[in-house]
Amino acid sequence: MDMKRDYYEDIQLLDSKVLWFWFLMLVAALATFPFIAPTYYVYMANYMAINVIVTIGLNILVGYTGQISLGHAGFFAIGAYGTVMLMSLLHFPFLLALVAAALIAAFFGFILGLPALRLEGPYLAIATLGFGMAITQVIGRWELFGGRMGVEAPALSFFGIPVMTDLGRYFVTATIAFIMVLGARNLMKTRVGRAFIAIRDSDIAAETMGVNLVYYKTLAFAVSAFYTGIAGGLFAFLLGFISPSTFNFILSIYFLAFVIVGGLGSIFGSVMGGIVMTWLLLELDKIQELPLIGGMLISFSENFMTVAGLPNISSIIFGLIIVLLVIFEPLGLYGFWIRTKIYWKTWPF
Amino acid sequence: MFLQLLLSGIAFGSLYALIALAMVIIYKTSEVPNFGQGEMAMLSTFVAFMLLDTYGHSFFVSFLGALVFAALLGVFLEFVFLRRAKDPNILSLILITLGFEMILYGVASWKWGADQKDLSFPVSDFDLVNIGPAVISYLNLATLLVALVLMVLLFLFFRYTKVGIAMKATQQNPMAARINGIRVNRILSVTWAMSSTIGAMAGMLLAPVATLDPNLMLEPLLKGFASAVLGGMTTLVGAALGGYMLGIIENLFGGYVSLEFKSIVAFGIIVLVLCFRPSGLFAKHYVRKV
């Protein structure tokens, strides 16, 4: 076993040669993937990358700092509309618009963090929920933002290179997602990350140890909102068209579901949660096309339910996954991963 | 004008108050903020619709049937899911109820589709009664009366019946309640049944005003929850008052300032109130001991 001799070795991102090897392999796999996979899967990968960013952002708030938010769709909307508006009205270049919109989202996160200093539990839930609702309502009523009809995303170009296809978007989205994941991992290894965790475990104890609650709680909200804003900006270009009804309350619940399924307080878990749940979300929409189950479901729907309502099965399955995971595996996929790892490490005992 | 707005505000407020009461009853005994409340009510309302429309039962039979269904649904959710959660914290409880919300929403829209149904209600929304210079529809009047009667009944229940007192004991200290011979688990089931029934009543009173589809209770639930938070999640009277206040404020704002931003204002006020009184207007704020 290698021993850590100083603090900087302890907070290194990749602390062994083996990890470096796998890290480079991952980069290579991510870079070659879009050339091998069919277009639909590249689209799916883009969707996954975006959801991974949101999941990590929300996990920083919920899993690491222990605050609840039911209004992250609001930050997502700010990121999406901010990026599109800055680009089409003020003619910002893409990257600048994306970061500026995310900073606006972060500012709103800071604002929302202020009441969170005094609220907890259901009270915080309702405050954040109200925020999320208010954002979409305001956007929907504002003519500048296209009102209820929504707006179209402008043509995307990255450092002067026009990006038109899913393949092109993949390189933008996946690169940004990759950087954001590394950034979050890094953040959690620093003083700031440790402060967040201390607040989660006991805010009073953290305060007596010298953690500035006002600063770090609002910072957690701001960082979380920043991540969500970036994801929102990328999402606008994935869909090519955004309208206020996209960013509803249900979306906020979905984000929370991603975090829970991945595992609270784990970056790796969030990556898994974002990927698995996005896959599930996209596949469940086509559940009636499945070979055996699909036909059964359709005939069941014809006899007892309505066929038009069949896609709502995804809502039922999502709900069941959340409920069962919280009851039986509170650590989510990450907990499952840890247990599998321990099992094989100590095998055959 | 003012009186009219006030009156319809109170009518809407009594619906919010009913939902708030349903949430507070559960929150008081088990500290679960039940986000599934709205969908539970929505599903029960759909059951009433099904009994009435598909099977052609009379209104009172369907109404009672829906209430029984609501009670069973509450017990089912509590017994099958919530009781299995080991050592839950507030976050996981919120998540479980959000899961209920998604499941029930999915079931209702699978069964009945997204198109809007019409729940025929024996009390009309169009016949009006004059109260001074203002008018109120029979339906709103009925809503008001039902809410008032329910509140009085609930008050008497918690004050004078054995089960009601056992519920209060469970809320204050489950362990001590158990030592004193109260079956805490059974009390929790009863709580869920009661709360679900009250929610179903709110749903059925709302359905004729709004349109009956799976989104029926989405906004009313949030408003009801908001009024519970406004009044304080731990007091029944406070939650009911919160509901009336929210209804009145919202309606006055809608009438005098802007109809469009009516629902945002409700949430804005709540955030402001919570900044100054973190446990709601009428609840005692307990400072947590380390």
Image (tube, coloured by chain):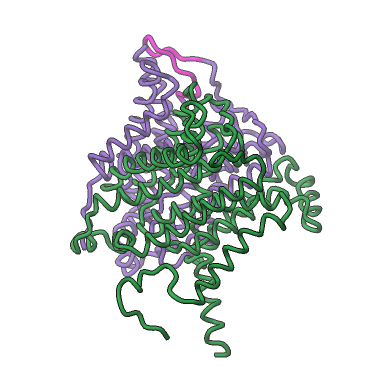
Chain colours: A green, B purple
Residue placed at 54% from the left, 21% from the top? Answer: B125
Comparing A245 with B75, the one in front is A245
Q: Is residue A55 above or below residue B57?
A: below
Residue A246 visible? The answer is yes
The magenta segment is B128-141
Q: Does the magenta run of residues contain B97?
A: no
Comparing B32 with A237, the one in front is A237
How many marks do you count on the picture? 0
Residue B61 visible? The answer is no
Give the quarter of the figure containing the C terminus of chain A.
Answer: bottom right
Residue B26 in the image: x percent, y percent?
41, 51
Q: Is residue B149 above or below residue B209?
A: below
Residue B41 in the image: x percent, y percent?
53, 42
Give the quarter of the figure containing the N terminus of chain A.
Answer: bottom left
Q: Does the magenta run of residues contain B139?
A: yes
Residue A334 in the image: x percent, y percent?
51, 67
- As drawn, the residue found furthest toward the bottom would be A349
